[in-house]
Amino acid sequence: MKTIKEKHSLAMRWCHWVNFPILTIMIWSGMLIYWASDTYSITLFGHTWFKFFPNWFYDTFNIPKRLAEGMAFHFLFMWFFTINGVVYVLYTIFSGEWRQLVPKRNSFKEAWQVLLHDLHIRKMAPPQKKYNAAQRIAYTAIIIMGFGSVITGLAIYKPVQFNTLTWLCGGYHAARIEHFVLTIGYVLFFIIHVVQVVLAGWRNFQSVVTGFEVVNDQPKQVIKPVSDEK
């Protein structure tokens, strides 16, 4: 027998799907800003061993220097990113949803077991409710990362007006590096998140759109005692 079970609230789905295009625009516009001044690389003993965007990348994709356009989009959509994040955090607090998102004492141990299960090394997955231990850690981390992006972004945007934030970030250049590292974190999270969604199947993805999940309820079998015949 199939039953419909509510899985995700409207507020959660709204913030999730609104954040996706906003974050995509933020990363794209941030790259336009960075490509106008490509400075980060790993250099040791006077030799550059690694550069995030080598020259062939710019030549192949014909990357333009669109600093003004990148800054315009980035500084506009950062407000939508911040507002959406604040709304989501307030919702989790007042609805009590945070109890299902915040990692528990044994979440890191269980997250390792989840990873082994996803890699087909461990047969049985650890018990979970709405979210497993790995999801708790990942979703909490992405909220902290969002908070960090806002802080470092303001430190870069107005280093004089927000000089306290800039100082807390370790200075302007440190804040810019931290902002860049957080962007890499978003990209990695997005890739892993999409892979996990694909592995979880269509039903899991559909529940994030509709808010409901169709569950197959298996009727319990009642075992009757066998009486002894004389």
Image (cartoon, rainbow, N blue to C red):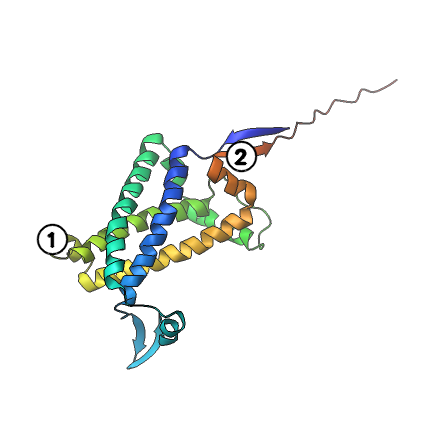
Q: Residue at x 39, y 69 (%)?
A: 61
- Which quadrant does the C terminus fall into? top right
* Front in this rendered view, residue 210 or 90: 210
Is 187 above or below relative to 228? Answer: below
Q: Which mark is residue 213?
A: 2
Is 170 above or below relative to 193? Answer: below
Q: Residue at x 30, y 38 (%)?
A: 87
Q: Position of residue 192 (x, y in %)?
A: 46, 54
Q: Residue at x 80, y 19 (%)?
A: 227
The residue sitting at the top extreme is 230
Is 130 above or below relative to 110? Answer: above
Q: Position of residue 106 (x, y in %)?
A: 43, 44
Q: Secondary structure at mark 1?
A: loop
- Marks 1 and 2, Cα distance to the nearest angstrom? 49 Å
Q: Amino acid at mark 2?
A: Glu
Q: Which residue is mark 1?
A: 161
Is 50 above or below relative to 20? Answer: below
Decide if residue 141 is in sight here.
Answer: no
Q: Position of residue 218 (x, y in %)?
A: 65, 30
